[in-house]
Image (cartoon, rainbow, N blue to C red):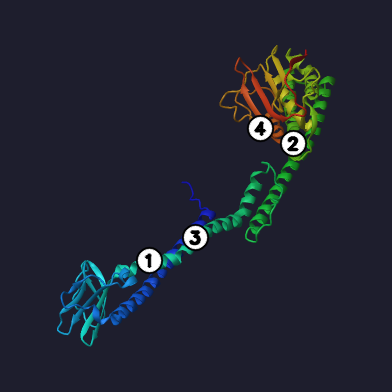
Amino acid sequence: MTPHMTSIRRWLLGWLIFGLAAACLVAGFGIFHTAREEASELFDYELRTVAISLPMNIAATDGTERPSHDFRDIADDRLVIDIWDKTGKLIYHPLKEPALPLIGDGFRSVDREGYRWRVFGIEQPDRFVQVAQPYFVRDELALKLALRTLWPLAVLVPVTVVLVLFVVARGLAPIGGLSRALASREGESLDPVQLDQRVPTEIRPLVDALNDLLLRLAAASQAQRSFVADAAHELRTPLAALKLQMQAAVRDGSLAGSGDTLARLEGRLNRIIHLAQQLLTMAREDAERETAMAPVSLRRLCEMCVGDFSMLAETKAIDLGLELEHATGPADPYTVIGDSHALAVLLNNLLDNAIRHTPRGGRVDVTLRREADSIALAVLDDGPGIPADEIGRVCDRFYRGAGAQGQGSGLGLAIASRVARRHRAGFSLANRSHGQGLAVWTHGLRAVGAQDVCVATRVHHD
């Protein structure tokens, strides 16, 4: 089951905006309610004023319904004025207005003609005056007053939302900075985290705890590398001495035994010596991840390594050569930014693997190729290749395939891939498509003074 993930940013923004919206709704309802009460008081005052101030001559004796008199703005408030004489006869009622019965003195609220009305009646010396008004007039005025009051709030809400977004983003910026600082680090970097901006008090304990963990991991990693290096160094010297003593004993006859037995013993001893050397190389590579890079001529380095392995290749009648693809000229040095010792270790391990697995009479090629602003280094052989289900694991430390032969330790390709990663280069293995053999490529070595493609040559070391 996937754990539920909570976003602090979403949580803060959601609750802040929800709180702001709820506050605006409550404020809007309160303002409308207050405006409605004020409008009711105002209209009640208007009803009473109109009833008291009506002139005595608006009544007529020849009919009860008359056109509305010119009450100016009062007519806009939908007032219905009714006048009765002392006998209870309706002597005035405007045309096109609903007829309301006589309600009585003072203020009343009644339902007539599908509307709710506010009615005020007053007894005068020779008549009874009643003034009525529908409630929707009051609600319309209250709504207008509320909207006039709320429009600044409506403008303020988006501004407040933007301000909340800005404040939350600024408040969480240190977390984003910490995430970016961790994401941009090297995969094996254990240095303390350094933030460009001032770390808030709330995040300081997290950063301090993380740095403390990194320091403890760095100490443990250094102790492990030191142990491997010391153990490999301590093993290499006595093993080499043991091999020399065995060879001397065989020569002077003090060590008796069959030739096969002695050969197997010497082979196992050579394998232990090779393993100790590989362990020492791996420990050195792990410890030198911060080594300064400098311009290195890959062509010269490859020529030296190919020359060093030429004698081993001759013993198996292997054609060992160096191919230069897309060279800028006959003397192109193929210069890259890197660690010359580490690159030599990479190439030596690849050549050792290739020659060991290539059958007698086969061919091993070291290839240098320019690719845009980088250089690729490859070692290709005619060996049996690697089963497809094992290619993804052969770069693991101490892994040897089911069909592996020879005295390998399972560290050669792991060391080579480690060197490639330290140079920020890609490292890939693939079985050659045109036949048997393996191609190991190191892509993306940063070139110095890369120029246009023009020449491809091959140097043989037979």
Going from N to C along the chain, the mark reached first, 3 or 2, is 3
- Residue position marked by numbered label 1 in the rendering: 143
Residue 71 x/y as whole percent: 31, 73
For residue 161, say whether it is visible.
yes
Check disc 3: other Cα within 10 Å, few if <14, some if 14-19, many if 20+: few
Q: Amino acid at mark 3?
A: Val
- Residue position marked by numbered label 3 in the rendering: 155
Please identify, in this view, whether the residue under mark 4 or under mark 1 is nearer the observer.
1
Going from N to C along the chain, the mark reached first, 2 or 4, is 2
Query: Foreground: 334 or 410?
Result: 334
Going from N to C along the chain, the mark reached first, 4 or 1, is 1
Tell me which corner region of the image, top left, top right, bottom left or bottom right, holds residue 99: bottom left
Tell me which corner region of the image, top left, top right, bottom left or bottom right, holds residue 261: top right
- Residue position marked by numbered label 2 in the rendering: 285
Residue at 20%, 86% in the rendered image = 126
Residue at 74%, 39% in the rendered image = 289
Query: Foreground: 331 or 395?
Result: 331
Tag 3–tag 2 contact (CB < 8 Å): no
Going from N to C along the chain, the mark reached first, 3 or 1, is 1
Q: Secondary structure at mark 1?
A: helix
Q: Amino acid at mark 2?
A: Glu
Q: Is residue 284 above or below residue 331?
A: below
Tag 2–tag 4 contact (CB < 8 Å): no
For residue 412, say whether it is visible.
no
Q: Amino acid at mark 1?
A: Leu
Disc 2 versus disc 4: distance between alpha carbons? 16 Å
Disc 3 versus disc 2: distance between alpha carbons? 63 Å
Please identify, in this view, whether the residue under mark 2 or under mark 1 is nearer the observer.
1
